[in-house]
Amino acid sequence: MSVEGQGLIAASPAPGSAMMRRLRAAAELLGRSPTGMFGGAIVLFWSVLALLAPWLAPYPPNKIDPALLADPYPSTAHWLGVDHLGRDILSRLIWGARTVLTVAPAAVIGAAAFGTILGLFAGYKGGLADRVIMRVGDTLLAFPKIILYLIIIARFGASAFNIIAVIAVTQAPIIARIVRAVTLDVKNRDYVAAARMRGESTWFILTTEILPNARGPLIVDFFLRLGYTVIAIGVLGFLGVGLPPPDPDWGSMIKETYGMIFIWPHMTLIPALAVSSLVVGFNFLATGLREAAEDG
Amino acid sequence: MADILAFEGVSIEHRGRRGVSRIIDDVSLHIAPGEALGLVGESGCGKSTVALAAMRYLQAGMRITKGRILFDDRDLSAMAEPELRGLRGSRLAMVYQDPMSSLNPVMTIGRQLMEVPLLHGESDERRARKRALAMLDEVRLPDGEAMMARYPHQLSGGQQQRVVIAMALMAEPALLVMDEPTTGLDVTIEAAILELVRELRRKFGTAILFISHNLGTIARLCDRVGVLYAGRLVETGAIRDVFRAPAHPYTRGLLEALPDLDRGRGAGRLVPIVGTLGAADRAREGCAFEPRCSFADAAVCGIGPIPLTAIDGAGTHQARCARLAAIPQRQAAAAAPTQAAAEDGPVLLALRGLTKWYEIGGDLFGRSSRKIRALTDVDLEARRGGTLAIVGESGSGKSTLARVVAGLVDGASGTARLGDAELAAGVDERPRDLVRRVQMVFQNPDSTLNPSHNIGFALMRPLKLLRGMTTQDAEAEARRLMARVQLPVELMARKPGQLSGGQRQRVAIARALAGNPDLLIADEPVSALDVSVQAAIVNLLADLLGNSEMGLVLISHDLALVRHMADWVAVMYLGRVVEYGPADKVFAPPFHPYTQALLAAAPRPDPDAPAPDVVLAGAMASPTAEIRGCVFASRCPVKLGAICETTLPPERIFGPHRIACHIELTA
């Protein structure tokens, strides 16, 4: 059930082109699912904005101009209007996309790496190691996540690194569970026995024989989890423990203006819409990939 | 004569995402009341679809495009759902391969049996209960009252299938459809179930549509047989006509591909059917078998639908072949003989007192609650250049034995020596050279190769690891290996998912040979393959062994295969070797009672083979139970008495042949 690479049968002529073909095959698979295409388009849209922020943003994101509060609504000069300090909302959204699209993937990649190693190890070794790893993970999962975030960030301070670390640690047990389930299934397959019969190391068996078979569920989960993480980052920003101001962060944008929602609703609703659209984008992308994988 | 079931030129199509494909093409068959019709064919030939169509259960996307299915002269395809429901379970009943799929796990056996009459007009609970008890007695399930109160999971596989048959017969149906009813069962259980079906058929006069891939079970049960290939009926006739004088090349191929239980090693090579059934062949207008047929002539075989032509005067034996006249009479044993080991080589593998317990269950801290005895005091030898076969039913410990020798299961006590080296328990603790010398071929072609890596990877890794080759050398050697197992080199770039089961098994053999092992262990290497493919793999193994010093340990439940391949045979039951010796001696008297029962139960593709004279009752004793006497005592048909249960049987020794039994056997 490989998500990408189905039908790649030719021997690899050049490493670079193999990578390209893989990407193309993935895109082709996604092309079969309209939902996935739609999600992919949203994610691509925000990614391009984030990547080109310095060139696309019409104003510096932190430029305060109280004079603009006379008419903060969208206009030809400020397409999405300005916020309560007179900062251009479009520019802040574009720069904010950069923040969220760096922090969220970094956090999820961290969680995936950490969780995968734990899951492989727990599933393959079994016994005491398995029990300890999974019970510690369960304990971590039993905590209400937001409270856990608040405690840790209140203790260590709000920074991009701390947010990434705390999300990576708290999400890892779920990924470990997915990988462990695949490992438990795959480790009893004959090809793993065959690998042992030729004297492969445990590390090779884990990474080369078992892990590739978890690729499908992991990729789907990766995009779903990106969606959750975008929400989590938004919530942290909203609770005031997100990235330190004045750098633009969608959650903080909502938090700073929600008191004025009945006076100037666009200041809150536009960043809220941005968060939702990106979450929907990631979810649809995950759904599309799953459909493509099921289709084989 | 009114037929109970008739297919009149039925075609069934499947519409899916990948377009329309033809599953059944112009199949006509009929079953008279009380008659048993067998349908045989390899996987994918459409036989299960025919079975389901007879009940008018068609999968989503399947549609009858042509023809009629008549049950009792009424068209099933025109019937409304309520009317069908009335028929199913009362006049029409079905038994599937997996009994657990037809039993409700949360209802007692009694409830499920009583439901049948209660749903079909019986209103009195007590009468329904009485009938259920009577039926349990009919299917030879002892202690009916206790059985009624049990749940399906508390029964063995054979007992479950008996319950399903009882359920099917509760309403005394006019037609019983059986789709591979004994395929998942051990041979002794299979023989007992087939005997039961024969008897019940005589008693109730039920007509049977019996679907199987196994010619032996068809021969034992059916009056007539139909052979399906790619959704078409290619041959049909009375069972003796078809088995004695098969006309269609495919039918002949199926029969010739089978090893013969009565002829030992060196008797003759099996004749495989070349190639596999591809999607393109399925869609052919002409004969779908043409690409695999040695008598094919494109000029006549490729054109138009080929009609069924009568072979005998009466017109009951028919075959769908355009070249019937050109095909010579069947010649028996024309094939070149396999090479039997001229004399026994030196001992390669010696096992002494090998014993292995599995620990099961386990609490929070990993302490296990029960122990299962998988192997007890196994003493065996495998020789260079020879084949040691280990036979037994599931639960006999034969796979554990293979895995212990391979080092995949550790924690066994006793000694295992390979040549002059001690085989350490786990493969991880063995020195690299010892790892190289023992290699294994696994049973399941679906899991033997990693779906994420291509074939080249599977062959090159062991070459690099076990023989220290560079990537370049390994690639060249991998090509040679591919040639040795008769696979095209192009396949090396493919992923396992793109290979057929037989091809995958060849790759698995090539992989095992990569390290030039001294000992090859093959755990049921062909049991998951179709008959025709099986023969090719068996021949390949014979060729590879024929000119080498390598020893083979063959694990198998198929006695005919063992007879064909083995020089030495060990018969195992519940973890113990009950009989061991040279193949010719083990397959001839004196027998251990268990060996005798196995031999009697083995299905033979011969309608005139005598019914088994020994049919084992019951199931293997629980492996957790403590057994002080003979392991076979609980099922032994010739048990002497208390001594069998209290004292270990002595070894009766006849030269190299030994039998563990209390009965005084004489050579």
Image (tube, coloured by chain):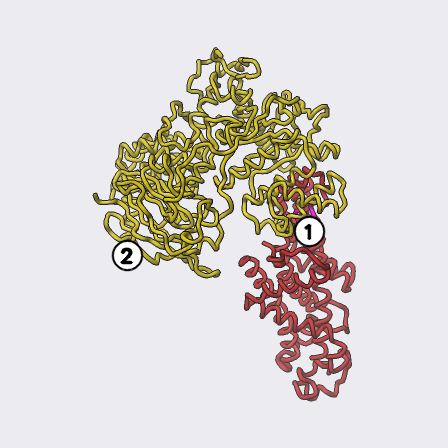
Chain colours: A red, B yellow
Q: Which mark is residue A116?
A: 1
Q: Is residue B392 visible?
A: no
Amino acid tagged 2: Ala
Q: Is residue B89 left or right of residue B342?
A: left
Q: Quadrant of residue B441?
A: top right
> Label 2: chain?
B
Relative height, residue B270 to residue B420 (above, below):
below
- Graded by Cα atoms within 10 Å as few (under 14), some (14 to 19) or many (20 or more), the crowding at tag 2 reads few
Relative height, residue B309 to residue B154 (above, below):
below
Q: CA distance from mark 1 to mark 2?
A: 56 Å
Where in the figure is residue B393, as x and y percent of width and height?
Answer: 50, 29
Q: Is residue A145 left or right of residue A32?
A: right
Give the magenta part as a residue range. A206-211
Residue toward you, A291 or B357: A291
- Graded by Cα atoms within 10 Å as few (under 14), some (14 to 19) or many (20 or more), the crowding at tag 1 reads many
Residue toward you, B559 or B336: B336
Relative height, residue B128 to residue B69 (above, below):
above
Amino acid tagged 1: Thr
Where in the figure is residue B636, as x and y percent of width and height?
Answer: 44, 20
Q: Which mark is residue B78?
A: 2
Where in the figure is residue A60, as x and y percent of width and height?
Answer: 77, 80
> Label 1: chain?
A
Where in the figure is residue B348, as x and y percent of width and height?
Answer: 66, 25
Residue toward you, B488 or A277: B488
**Which tag is nearer the camera, tag 1 or tag 2?**
2
Residue toward you, A210 or A83: A210
Under circle 2, the secondary element is helix
Under circle 1, the secondary element is helix
